[in-house]
Image (tube, grey):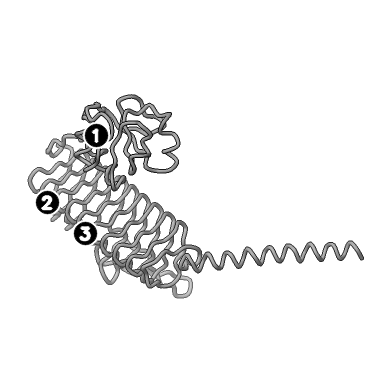
Amino acid sequence: MFTLKHIALEVSGMVVGDDSIMISAVDDIEEASSGAITFAFLPKYKKVLTSSDASAFVVTNKEDLQGSPGIVVENPYLAMIKILELFSKKKIIEHKISANAEISKSAKIGKNVSISSFSVIKNNVVIEDDVTIGSGVKINEGAIIGKNSCIKDNVIIYEDVHIGKHALIHSGTIIGSDGFGFTTIGNEHHKIPHIKAVIIGDFVEMGASCTIDRGSVKNTVIGDNCKLDNQVHIAHNVQIAQGCLLAAGVFIGGSSTVEEYCMVAGKTDIGPHITIGKGSMFAARSCVLKSLSGGEMYAGNPARPIKEKQERDAVYTKLKIIEKKLKQADAKKTKNN
């Protein structure tokens, strides 16, 4: 439980009203009860602020409080992060290695490492200090897990995968399986060997059930500070530069390159052997069939600069209207005859 003043100091905000109000929870504005703080910086929430039972509100303009107590901040999303962290129930990690874990004698285990039941650590694996490994994890030969990383339950990490520091890998993710590569001669499909690895940078987060294929002729690389949502697939030889955000269901085809600080919305497909320029943004369900220079917003199938797509859509709409009118005119003419 914290005073409103304490919370305001945490988020570098300005208190409006009684700063001694005690706050015991963070809730949605429509479900909040007395003692809770909530967020009212979006237009749809401003309309229900006066009917909410919350004790305080986070806004960007004092006037939005409409006489209610709250905190005025410059960056509401950063404030949200800090408040949620303040109220989060952080689990105290007991640094121990389960007797039910299978660990090779040649594996190197750092200080303050936690390994849960039924995990398997194979030969020559390196697990650096302060790493937490959940239950049912399998880390294969020669893999490296960087300091302060957290590997959740049932993750599989193939041989020679290198995961950097402060990584968070959620359950069900598979890193380092073979890429999908075949050459067909007659009726036979000949598998292309994938002999390289996967290299993951520092501060990378992967959601549940992601799949990251190992490279064939060069390592598959995910740069520092990249964040992947659930069920993202990264194919063999892909190079993703630092700071990229990939939402759920994104697919990136083999040997493609995504340059720095791109944002890719859900269920977007990026084909093989494509380069995506720095700072690109993609609307949901985009389909990228050729390389793009970057620095702007893209949408559609095939993906185009969004302004161009909107212009094309407007022309198409006008053509459909003209087509409808012509059909009506033809029908009227036929009826009159």
Quadrant showing the C terminus: bottom right
User: Residue at 35% across / 49% down in the picture?
Assistant: 209
Q: Choose between 291 and 280: the one closer to the eye.
A: 280
- Contact, mark 3 vs mark 2 (Cβ under 8 Å): no
As drawn, the residue found furthest toward the top would be 34
Mark 2 or mark 1, which has the lower sequence index? Answer: 1
Q: Amino acid at mark 2?
A: Glu
**In this figure, which residue is indicated by the disc labeled 1?**
87
Assess disc 3: are there few (<14), some (14-19) or many (≥20) residues with their C-alpha within 10 Å of its C-alpha.
Answer: many
Label 1 vs label 3, nearer the camera:
1
Q: Amino acid at mark 3?
A: Gly
Assess disc 1: are there few (<14), some (14-19) or many (≥20) residues with their C-alpha within 10 Å of its C-alpha.
Answer: some
On screen, residue 142 versus residue 191, left or right, reads: left
Label 2 vs label 1, nearer the camera:
1
Query: Which image quadrant for residue 222?
Result: bottom left
User: Residue at 29% across / 65% down in the picture?
Assistant: 260
Q: CA distance from mark 3 to mark 2?
A: 15 Å
All told, the count of numbered labels is: 3
| On screen, residue 47 above or below 297 | above
Q: Choose between 194 and 34: the one closer to the eye.
A: 34
**In this figure, which residue is indicated by the disc labeled 2?**
128
Q: CA distance from mark 1 to mark 3?
A: 29 Å
Quadrant showing the N terminus: top left
**In this figure, which residue is indicated by the disc labeled 3?**
201
On screen, residue 82 versus residue 93, left or right, reads: right
> Residue 309: image x %, image y %?
51, 66
> Residue 112: image x %, image y %?
9, 43
User: Residue at 25% across / 36% down in the picture?
Assistant: 15
In terms of secondary structure, where does tag 3 sit?
loop
Q: Amino acid at mark 1?
A: Phe
